[in-house]
Image (cartoon, helix red, strand yellow):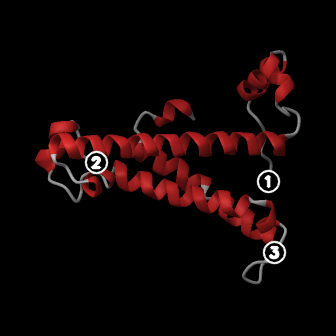
Amino acid sequence: MSHDLTLQDLTFIYRLRSTPVGGLLSLDDNIQLHKIVASVIAVFAILHTIFHYLDFVAYRALLGLSIQGQAFGNLAGTIENCRRICANPSFVGVTGHLLWLLMIIMFITALEFVRSRRCCGRGGYDVFWLFHHLYIPVLLIMLIHSPRFWMYV
């Protein structure tokens, strides 16, 4: 199975190589670059979630909305309360939490100590490879979670 970079990706990496950032990143070592990208995704996912929960706390104090109702796309709250703060009640909270679960599984199985050991009668690398293919449902769920996500793929 080949994972070739597109011409646009190669052009971006070529241009990035000629900047000061190029000296800091291992752009020619695809595994190291993959780990850096995964770390950046993890950091921004954590920040994204923290700021959502800070909003939930503020809206609870301001409008009396439950944190659980807001966190799960207002499915547990009332639609009327949701319409006060969001124009379109949706499954954003449910898909966001599902994305968290899938990404945590991907991150944990990508750790060196998991990849180098046998787990459940299978090789550690096999477990990593199997769960790393969760990127496909992650991308699909991201499209449901944020309709504008397609612009960033």
Mark 1, secondary structure of its residue: loop
Residue under the image location 74 percent in, 22 percent down: 12
* Residue 88, picture quadrant: top left
Q: What is the distance, in whole Å, between disc 1 and disc 2 at their CAs?
A: 37 Å
Q: Nearer the viewer, residue 1 or 95?
A: 95
Residue 96 lies, in percent from the top left, at: 43, 51
42 relative to 115 in the view: left or right: left
Q: What is the distance, in whole Å, between disc 3 and disc 1 at their CAs?
A: 19 Å
The residue that mark 1 highlights is 1
Q: Tell me if label 3 and label 2 are in contact, CB under 8 Å.
A: no
Residue under the image location 79 percent in, 71 percent down: 124
* Residue 128, picture quadrant: bottom right
* Residue 147, picture quadrant: top left
Depth-wise, is mark 1 or mark 2 nearer the camera?
Answer: 2
Circle 3: is it few (<14), some (14-19), or many (20+) Cα within 10 Å?
Answer: some
Residue under the image location 79 percent in, 22 percent down: 21
- Identify residue type, mark 2: Ser
> Which mark identifies residue 90?
2
Sequence-first tag of 1 and 2: 1
Residue 121 lies, in percent from the top left, at: 77, 84
Q: Nearer the viewer, residue 26 or 146?
A: 26
124 relative to 76 in the view: left or right: right
Sequence-first tag of 3 and 2: 2
**Quadrant including the C terminus:** top right
The residue that mark 3 highlights is 123
Q: Is residue 42 above or below residue 98?
A: above
Q: Is residue 63 visible?
A: yes
Residue that protrudes farthest toward the bottom in the picture = 121
Q: Nearer the viewer, residue 21 or 79?
A: 21
